[in-house]
Amino acid sequence: MASTPLIRGRWGYASITDKIADIVLRRPTHWIWGVGLLVTLVMSVFFFGAMGYLFTRGVGIWGVNIPVAWGFAIGNFVWWIGIGHAGTFISAFLLLLRQKWRNSINRFAEAMTLFAAGIAGIWPILHVGRPWFAYWLVPYPNVMNYWPQWRSPLVWDFFAISTYLIVSLVFWYVGLVPDLATLRDRATSKTKAMVYGFFALGWRGEARHWARYEIAYLLLGGLAAPLVVSVHSIVSLDFAVGNTPGYHSTIFPPYFVAGALYSGFAMVLTLAIPMRHFFGLEDFITKRHLDNAAKIMLATGLIVAYGYCMEVFTAFYSNDEYEIGMTMNRFFGPYAFVYWGVITCNVVIPQLLWFRFARYNVWILFALSLVIQLGMWSERFMIVVTSLSRDFLPSSWGLFVPSIWDVTMLIGSIGFFFFLFLCFIRVLPAITIFEMRELKHEELEGRQP
């Protein structure tokens, strides 16, 4: 039996190019896109306005205090860096595994990675209290011959995030070059042709261009693939190297990586479903693509559920009264509603993905993606806050209550992310043109006797 085609409908090579390129070059702006851009722009203004107020007043405007010195900022950092993982996984791992279904979603997933990782990098800088001294993390020999504290997780995060951003940006840009040349050749104005032509680097589609491109793209894919595992593993060490109950756990690196892919693929669906609907891309981002993404979400969600079980098991099996106390505090303490909300959103509700009707219903998938995003953010809050609120000494216990500035900056960062994404889909092709043409060619070759 022939497999389900990845491109639905009778599309020729030229029509595929026209359909994707015209969204950028000729298609008039939809009013819904304009409203979304305006709303997200306002949210972005609030985000940067709150950031400016933070610079003048300090981190005291947040709800952080002793003993909960980490609050929304670190939770947001871990959440955002996790969202970016799906783009790297789709681009690198699935490329090396020759999974053709990635071709319809890799471009905007890579853009999602860049935006999410960039926003993630803001939070640790803000949290240190003196962001204008963030350059101290850079390993340069200053006049006093001081170097960064290499045992500090903050330094590890700097190297992890900067490497992740640089490799992801280069990988994304190299993949864009052939499509930039296509936009250059189809541009409707001289200005557009000059801009796209400048970034196309003189691409003419010659055989030697394609040969060198394929080599460079595969090498970058091989370089980016380990980052899927390494980056969030390093982020998890921010917690695992500490001796705080609930932090000091060897399961954190694989547990965090699985959670990152879980939330990352949820964000891919959150972006893909409205985009395919409003831009008429159902023939390119088919239900088979959504089904595959949902299956990966189901698999990673089961790994996350296993991590939850192992946390509880090891706490009681160790017979450590502090670990047991931390676990019971999560079950029945003041933040119990967060823990049970995490279990509901990340474990219970996503079991719908076992059923084909749920994986092929776009609105159920969209709702599930939002539920998982909420659950994964709540999980980060649970890990960061509940362990700190009740440490070893009862005399040091205290609760974290977020301020209006915590909430404003969280919502504002989400708005800024969607603002960047809305700008992206109107300036650059959200789907890879040349890979879709190659996929169409392979499907036509496969039908020939």
Image: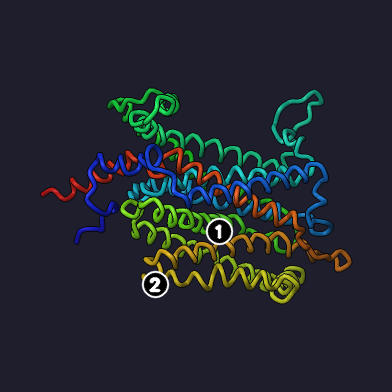
Amino acid tagged 1: Gly
41 relative to 208, above or below: below
Q: Position of residue 300 (x, y in %)?
A: 49, 61
Mark 1 touches mark 2? (CB < 8 Å): no
Quarter occupied by residue 71: bottom right
For label 1, the residue is: 259
Residue that appears at 29% across and 53% down: 6
In the depicted view, which residue is nearer to us: 408 or 167?
408
Q: Position of residue 370 (x, y in %)?
A: 53, 62
Q: Is residue 299 visible?
A: no
132 sits left or right of 339 in the view: right
Q: Residue furthest left?
A: 449
Q: Position of residue 24 (x, y in %)?
A: 41, 39
Residue that appears at 32% across and 41% down: 435
Quarter occupied by residue 207: top left
In the depicted view, which residue is nearer to us: 140 or 167?
167
Amino acid tagged 2: Phe
User: Quick one: label 1 or label 2, which is nearer the N terminus?
Assistant: 1
Tag 2 secondary structure: loop
Q: Position of residue 393 (x, y in %)?
A: 85, 65
How many numbered discs? Answer: 2
For label 2, the residue is: 355
User: In the rendered image, which quarter contains the N terminus?
Assistant: bottom left
Front: mark 1 or 2: 2
281 sits left or right of 305 in the view: left
